[in-house]
Image (tube, rainbow, N blue to C red):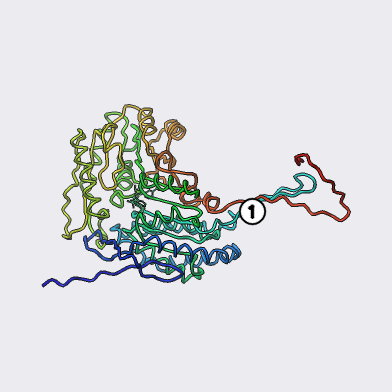
Amino acid sequence: MAVEQRVKELHHFINGEQVEGSSGRYSNVYNPSTGEVIAQVPLATRDEVKHAIEVAKKAFPAWKKLSSGKRAEIVLKFRQLLKENEEELIEVICQESGKTKEDARGEITRGLESVDLAINASHLLKGEYSVNVGGNINAFSTKSPLGVVAAISPFNFPVMVPLAITSMAVAVGNSVILKPSEKVPMSALYFSELWKKAGLPDGVWTVINGDKEAVDELLENPTIEAISFVGSTPVAEYIYQTGTNYNKRVAAFGGGKNFMIVMPDADLEKTANAFIGAAYGAASQRCMAISGAMAVGKETADKFVAILKEKIENLKVGPYTDNEVDFGPVITMQSKEAVIKAINKGVEEGAKLVVDGRNPSICEVSNGFYLGPTLLDEVKPSMEIYEQEVFGPARIVVRVESLQEAIDLINDHELGNGVTIFTNNGAAARKFQEEIEVGMVGVNVPIPIPVGYHNFGGWKRSKFGEGFMFGPDQARFFTKSKTISEKWIDVDDETTTTFAFPSN
Ligand code: NAD
């Protein structure tokens, strides 16, 4: 008789400790590399979220009052602990997301950039000061934390995105509630313990696990002042519309369709290497992954596709336990099915299948959610696979006649997260930078994700609301400004009552 294997039951992190869920509702957490259920995550009720919000609210005044230097010491300690525990954290990321170890290490490194900026938050909290704006009055502005703020994160970066959307919020003095993706909750729970160890007062940091029910409480609860969301475009739009309807500050980041324009003068061998890493890395499950190439001219397209074909056929897909693999599985079986459906539809609509990754042979046989790399050529803008974000390793080639045609097509696309051009022609690069309607732009850089001290955010339906996912603007997003006009009246000063509107 088969013995039922018990899986780990995960908790919430409230008031500085792990708290059992009480809803009785759970979601399975998979190891995508093996297909096994490795844990069950509780899905919070609205009452559980309300309780977490109350705890966070109580912790806020003391955290706000602490000097920014003292808060920075705690954030710095947290950073040190992340680094000291990096190997364990990599293992947790890999287990629940399926990404390779080096990719997980890269995500931690990029996440640390946001922590680094947060350590220096004092610099970004400086206000403005004007002397004698009129009648011996000095005017100055200050920045205060908002109160309790929420962050909602996607599955594809279990550490980098949560760090990116919360570190500054904590550092500038808010209490922060993170609702991680229910598909990858273990990484956030892991680093919650590091916040505790770093000395963050209980209640300032909360992880509430859940699905739409928990999110809806965060969106509607009057105590929540701001929401930073990262995920798919339809959910981002919902979060923005609902959150702002409840008078919250909302920055909601959605999906991407990120093209690489390949100019006739580009070194096609080097461009192909850049394309493949950026397009298929992490099984293409990056919001900034290259979704496809726009090759300018028939000759460029023919040569580029031929080079890509040969290289793509040699990529190795497998579990993170094998250090030789280029990328791992996609996150769930449903995700795998969605990618296969998108490929099938592309073929049905007339795209040419150059490399077919629908049935990869993985040597370490398992029930993992693997897909090989797929490349579709001669994709037209009217096809579904052109219009929609495909979150898995199916990439496309679109053939265009000119740089202008490529720019126009990209500008017409509803998504505008990232884009890049590969060329040695300065005039073409300059035209592209000036005319392209996309938030993050690369020139001979395949994934133009800004460094942590620049603002990250797409345009069009890749971002709803003002504010950026990370970067200096976050200090503004997570604070409110107050402008003070101050005058000290000397005993000898003469004063009169005036009914005219005061002016300088
Ligand atoms: P998702 O939208 O399914 O989920 C994101 C979060 O929203 C999760 O925490 C989830 O629990 C919650 N959620 C899901 N459905 C909801 C609903 N109906 N109501 C309320 N909350 C809901 O996204 P995902 O599949 O986890 O992540 C992949 C997507 O995220 C891709 O589209 C990718 O491009 C995007 N993404 C964008 C960026 C960016 O910078 N713009 C970065 C990373 C990921």
Taking the spot 20% from the left edge, 33% from the top edge, the residue there is 349
Question: Looking at this rendering, what residue extends furthest in the left direction?
Answer: 1
Which amino acid type is marked by label 1?
Thr
Q: Is residue 69 visible to the viewer in this orientation of the structure? A: yes
Q: Is residue 113 visible to the viewer in this orientation of the structure? A: no
| Residue 276 percent across, percent down from the top left | 29, 45
Taking the spot 59% from the left edge, 65% from the top edge, the residue there is 66
Q: Is mark 1 within 8 Å of ligand 1?
A: no
Image quadrant assignment for residue 444: top left
The quarter in which the N terminus is drawn is bottom left
The quarter in which the C terminus is drawn is top right
| Residue 252 percent across, percent down from the top left | 43, 47
Q: Is residue 471 above or below residue 61?
A: above
Taking the spot 35% from the left edge, 54% from the top edge, the residue there is 212
Mark 1: few/some/many CA within 10 Å (<14, 14-19, 20+): some
Q: Which residue is mark 1?
A: 142
Front-lying residue, 103 or 43: 43
| Residue 313 percent across, percent down from the top left | 20, 46
Q: Is residue 346 above or below residue 203?
A: above
Compared across the picture, whether 223 is left or right of 334 comes to: right
Front-lying residue, 161 or 253: 253
Which SS class for mark 1?
strand
Front-lying residue, 107 or 345: 345
| Residue 345 percent across, percent down from the top left | 20, 38
Question: Looking at this rendering, what residue extends furthest in the right direction?
Answer: 492
